[in-house]
Amino acid sequence: MIAIHFEEKVDCRKLYHELTHYVEKYQPYGLGADIKVNEDGILYVSYQDVKVSFYDSFHPLLASLLTEFVINSKEEEWLLSIIESMFYFTDKEEQYQILSIAKLILEGDKQDLPDIQLFFNRKEFIYRAFATNIEQETSFYYEPFLTFRLREYGELLIDCVEMAIDEYMLEQDYQNMLENYRQHLRKTPPKVSHLYVVHDEVFTLYDSQFRELTKEEILFYLEEELIFEEGVDVQDMMISPLVSMVPAEVHVFTDEPENGVVLSIQSIFEERLHIYPLKEQIDKKHEPT
């Protein structure tokens, strides 16, 4: 018999109901177990199927259920605790924004981040801890088990939060940059009437006569205090030159309106921006000047 002792009786009851559900679900396939819980917060699990080895059937099921139970009942609480106690973010809104990013990282939904593959294996860390320590006849205390046996998982969560905070701060800087650019456009009279941007794998900037701007022309308009693309060659910059030239209107030709640079231009220039399919730039090039 397996006995799991809980300090939190709510957790004990939740796991009892989940285990009962799965045992009933797989009983027609030969899985048998007797599950009981008492008022002291102790969950008793007795494997009953003598035909199939405990380690071939119920053991992996129990380890998997406990893994999912830890993630569903504890992970968010631990992430928030790390955010506040280790990184000193006390504002609730900031905490939950960082938490949201951390969850995306853990679920593999932020593919642009380096070394993110590590976080996909968090279930393996938890599963291995339970699988290694659970025997057919064993007794353990749940909360101390989480504290001492899941240290590898805890360290992974700390790394995840640190990465999430970096992403959050970058996003804050990005949003501040967008707002600063919008403010600059609102208070500065237009320097040119129209600018055209062609996005065909790369971004190319054209003047009001649809003539490609040279590096020297871009440098002429470029305001140093508006540059955020540090370390990027002038001809590869797009947003800083656009803002520096303060156009009355910007026309973007692209087949990828969800491209990050296009979305940034849209957020900055708002009603000044017009987006067209890429093929329409061919007609524009042949318009009489």
Image: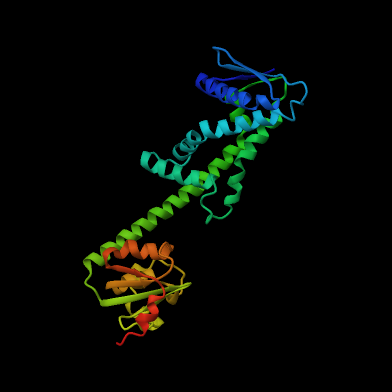
Left or right, 133 with respect to 275, comes to right
For the view shown, which residue lies furthest in the bottom direction? 288
Residue found at the very far top of the displayed protein: 39
Nearer to me, 188 or 76: 76
18 over 41 or under it: above or below: below
Position of residue 30 measured from the top left corner of the image (x, y, whole percent): 71, 25
The residue lying at 34 percent from left, 76 percent from top is: 196
Report which quarter residue 147 is drawn in.
top right
Is residue 91 among the parts visible in the rendering? no
Q: Is residue 52 left or right of residue 196?
A: right
Q: Residue at x 52, y 35 (%)?
A: 75
Quadrant in the picture for the C terminus: bottom left
Q: Give how far across and how far down residue 125 sits, in percent.
A: 64, 38
The answer to whether residue 91 is left or right of residue 162 is left
Q: Eyeballing the image, is 110 above or below 158?
A: below
- Foreground pick, 47 / 224: 47
Residue 230: x and y, percent? 44, 67
Residue 151 found in image quarter: top right
Q: Quadrant of the N terminus?
A: top right
Measured from the top left, where is residue 120 in percent x and y? 59, 45
Q: Is residue 245 visible?
A: yes
Q: How many marks?
A: 0
| Image position of 29 with respect to 257: above or below | above
Colour mapping used in the image: rainbow
Q: Residue at x 60, y 24 (%)?
A: 19
Q: Residue furthest front?
A: 28
Q: Nearer the viewer, residue 39 or 232?
A: 39
Residue at image x 58%, y 46%? 119
Taking 12 as reference, is 167 left or right?
left
